[in-house]
Image (cartoon, rainbow, N blue to C red):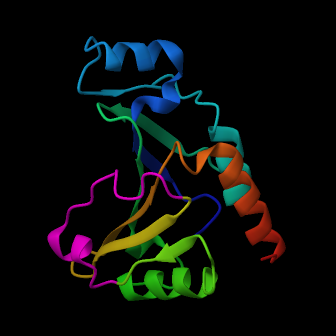
Amino acid sequence: MPADYPVTINAVSGYSGGGKSMIADFEGGTAPAFELYGLGFEHKHLPETQLYAGLARRPIFVPSVGDYRQGMLVSVPLHLDTLRGKPGGADLYAALTRRYAGSKYVSVMPLDAAAVKSGRLEPEALNETNMLELYVFASDAYRQAVLVARLDNLGKGASGAAVQNMRLMLGLE
């Protein structure tokens, strides 16, 4: 991906990561079923996302929260014809498969996975685990793709993900 690629990240998570007042609102029945937040373009994870993705252009990050306790889906839409080499969905899948081969906690899901065939993915399937699933949803006909990560935002947590990312970057078990 070119450093100046206009990256957009959409993420929906359960309310458990939103702090005491958000948890109280959802568990008390006063919160909406779904809401966007961080719409001031200053979300705390934007600087690290830009830095570690090697992006010259600040990504647009649209976080949201749903009326469920935990689980998370993070998606990155891509226009394939704007990427170097004009990859197809199978190329993206192959690159992710090579990158995460042998990973204990990260699984690249097959292109023919049931979720890919149905065009649907729910956020709670990995609750109570330390796992992360990566999906490639692609249309070579339209030259578009959406990369999706599914994880338990409460189970994996930021610190667990940080340690795993560090180990991946350093090539450690």
Evaluate whether residue 142 shows in this view.
no
Q: How many marks?
A: 0
Seen in the picture, residue 74 relative to 64 is either above or below; the reply is below
Residue 87 found in image quarter = bottom left
Residue 47 found in image quarter = top right
Residue 119 in magenta?
A: yes
Q: Main secondary structure of the magenta part?
A: loop
Residue 3 in magenta?
A: no
Front position in the image: 162 or 38: 162
The percent position of residue 161, horizontal first and vertical second, equals: 66, 54
Q: Is residue 35 left or right of residue 7?
A: left
Q: Residue furthest front?
A: 128
The percent position of residue 17, horizontal first and vertical second, equals: 51, 31
Front position in the image: 97 or 95: 97
Region in magenta? 111-129
The residue positioned 58% from the left and 51% from the top of the image is 156
